[in-house]
Image (tube, rainbow, N blue to C red):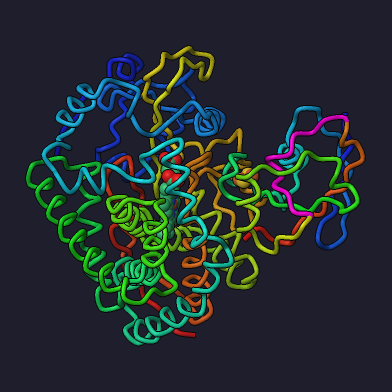
């Protein structure tokens, strides 16, 4: 059960228990995190599930593939720590992950 | 008016699903509620399609990577030709090259390649660059309409904006934008309600004229590229990513996908504000609610409520197994009123959050133009509410367009009282 901490743009923090095999997007949506709009439902087709991984923890995740990388270039304010939460599958290795949410996806 | 009989499955239970009837146009949501209440999916013989109406089932189908939009490769070419004949889609040389083939109606690698080439033009950042332009255009329109006071909101305001903006995006000079609207309407009207030979001729002629127009525009733009879709596509074609036909087809799709739908949801969204004055007052008092209000308009009266998918593999949906080749109907408009996905689903709530609806579809074909459509809406409603003291419905009998594929009022007669 990886524990994930989501931090909103205004600093509000929420710790959630995710399930292994769940995507980071699904974990956020299941816990009512509105900032993850996830409009295409997880098909890497909209870019509205964008989030920033705590910089020191980037190595905990497998790198983004070509489709995710291309989509990240299209989101608002992309940074080196940017990921699409629908493309991140959670395992025990990500226990303790800290995820920063953008103020807006549009 | 074509008369369609109810499918046996539906009439057995005394439920006559007749989506082309005026009664359905008056209130599709009662029929949608009855569909959602039935076990599994509902087979609708007239369209030879299995209708999904619950949020869960519609989501499962759009997110399923084995579901596609195009029949290519799924059935023998003879059968595709036979189906085209049955639908009266045959013998339309330009229409079949540029409309029947499109980014929307392709899948897999072809779809990925075409979508990638235009995606960049539709990102939030790119769309935001159109903001000042749209605002200036809407301001000028409103200057005139606030003097006029008695307006048909659909014709005088809604219909004036999206064609102009998409024209700008494609790279069409302003003075030609009215032509785009006529062509796109003449093509779109052949999709759903009326497949007569007369309509077919009109659709083919419009496609031909549009094709010739775009070819000339392209030849002109080749002399000097700009920051528009045509120039982007010229580059993609030069890089070997796009064929000439794909170029024309993509321009046409973008115009057709974004034009009528935006007009319709502007109309139904305005109608919602009039039907729910408490919500209109709330929005007027707090313009920061505009983004959620617009998101709710898309959910509450989804302007493109019906799409389809084909199964490329045997699949189980809503507990029932279906063979490869099955055609599924996605009732986005019904899923978006599903009480198991939305609290008080039939309530129009300008502050609704979260509001993850399916009005823009989902999965690989998720709407490319959603940011643009939202921006048009936010600017129009924001400006209108700020510049009026009151907006009154002059004729409360509002008639909606007929058909399963579209949702929007035909006209909306208003009296504007300037602030
Ligand atoms: C006003 C509201 C709009 C609504 C409700 C809407 C809805 C949709 C939906 C539901 C789909 C997916 C179809 C499916 O599931 O099979 C779609 C696709 C598409 N839309 Fe929109 N749309 C709107 C506006 C626009 C605008 C303004 C544009 C462009 C200027 C646009 C361009 C497209 C394109 C190109 C596709 C095909 C994407 C693909 O197949 O990958 N749409 N739209
Ligand atoms: S949910 Fe659309 S890209 Fe992740």
Residue at image point 49% right, 17% down: B315
Question: Is residue B8 magenta-colored?
Answer: no
Closer to the camera, B202 or B51? B202
- Rendered location of residue B244, percent (x, y): 29, 54
> Residue at position x 52%, y 19% from top?
B318
Q: Can residue B304 be seen in this view?
A: yes
Position of B37 compared to B206: left or right? right
Q: Position of residue B235 (x, y in %)?
A: 41, 62
Image position of B121 with respect to B360: above or below: below
Q: Where is residue B131 in the image (x, y as percent from the top left)?
A: 51, 75
Q: Is residue B375 above or below residue A51?
A: below
Picture mark count: 0
B378 displayed left or right of B173: right
Residues B186 and B106: in front is B106
In the rendered image, which quarter contains the N terminus of chain B? top left
Asked if residue B329 lies left or right of residue B315, the reply is: left
* Residues drawn in magenta: A81-92
Residue B55: horizontal and vertical position, in percent? Answer: 54, 33
The single residue placed furthest to the left in the displayed view is B198
Rendered residue at 56%/42% (across/down): B345
In terms of image quadrants, where is residue B260?
Answer: bottom left
In this view, the residue in front, B378 or B67, is B67
């Amino acid at each position: 059960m990886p524990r994930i901490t989501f931090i909103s743009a205004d600093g509000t923090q929420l710790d959630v228990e995710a399930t292994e095999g769940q995507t980071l997007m699904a974990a956020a949506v299941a816990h009512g995190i509105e900032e993850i709009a996830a409009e295409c439902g997880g098909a890497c087709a909209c870019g509205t599930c964008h989030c920033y991984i705590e910089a020191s923890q980037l190595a905990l995740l497998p790198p983004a593939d070509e489709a995710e990388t291309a989509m990240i270039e299209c989101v608002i304010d992309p940074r080196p720590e940017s990921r699409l939460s629908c493309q991140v599958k959670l395992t025990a290795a990500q226990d303790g992950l800290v995820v920063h949410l953008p103020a807006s996806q549009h | 008016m074509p008369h369609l009989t109810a499918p046996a499955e539906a009439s057995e239970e005394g439920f006559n699903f007749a989506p082309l009837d005026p009664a359905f146009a008056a209130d599709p949501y009662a029929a949608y509620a009855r569909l959602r209440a039935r076990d599994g999916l509902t087979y609708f013989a007239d369209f030879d399609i299995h209708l999904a109406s619950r949020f869960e089932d519609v989501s499962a189908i759009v997110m399923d990577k084995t579901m596609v939009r195009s029949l290519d490769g799924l059935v023998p070419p003879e059968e595709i030709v036979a189906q085209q004949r049955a639908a009266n889609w045959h013998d339309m040389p330009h229409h079949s090259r540029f409309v029947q083939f499109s980014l929307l109606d392709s899948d897999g690698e072809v779809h990925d390649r075409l979508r990638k080439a235009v995606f960049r033009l539709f990102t939030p950042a790119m769309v935001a660059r159109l903001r000042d332009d749209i605002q200036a255009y809407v301001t000028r329109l409103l200057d005139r309409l606030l003097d006029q006071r008695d307006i048909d909101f659909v014709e005088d305001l809604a219909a004036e904006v999206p064609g102009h903006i998409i024209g700008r995006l494609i790279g069409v000079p302003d003075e030609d934008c009215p032509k785009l609207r006529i062509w796109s309407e003449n093509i779109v009207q052949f999709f759903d309600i009326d497949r007569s030979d007369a309509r077919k001729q009109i659709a083919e002629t419009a496609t031909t004229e549009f094709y010739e127009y775009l070819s000339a525009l392209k030849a002109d733009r080749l002399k000097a590229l700009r920051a528009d879709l045509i120039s982007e596509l010229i580059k993609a074609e030069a890089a070997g990513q796009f064929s000439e036909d794909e170029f024309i087809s993509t321009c046409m799709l973008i115009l057709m996908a974004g034009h009528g739908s935006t007009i319709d949801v502007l109309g139904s969204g305005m109608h919602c504000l009039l039907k729910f004055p408490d919500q209109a007052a709330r929005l007027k008092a707090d313009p920061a609610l505009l983004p959620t209000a617009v998101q709710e308009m898309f959910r509450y009266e989804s302007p493109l409520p019906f799409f389809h998918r084909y199964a490329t593999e045997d699949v189980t949906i809503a507990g029932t197994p279906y063979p490869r080749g099955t055609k599924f109907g996605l009732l986005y408009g019904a899923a978006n009123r599903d009480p198991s996905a939305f609290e008080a689903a039939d309530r129009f709530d300008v502050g609704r959050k979260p509001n993850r609806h399916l009005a823009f579809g989902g999965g690989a074909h998720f709407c490319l133009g959603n940011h643009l459509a939202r921006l048009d809406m936010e600017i129009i409603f924001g400006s209108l509410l700020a510049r009026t003291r009151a907006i009154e419905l002059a004729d409360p009998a509002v008639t909606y367009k007929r058909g399963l594929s579209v949702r929007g009022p035909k006209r909306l007669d208003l009296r504007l009282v300037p602030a």
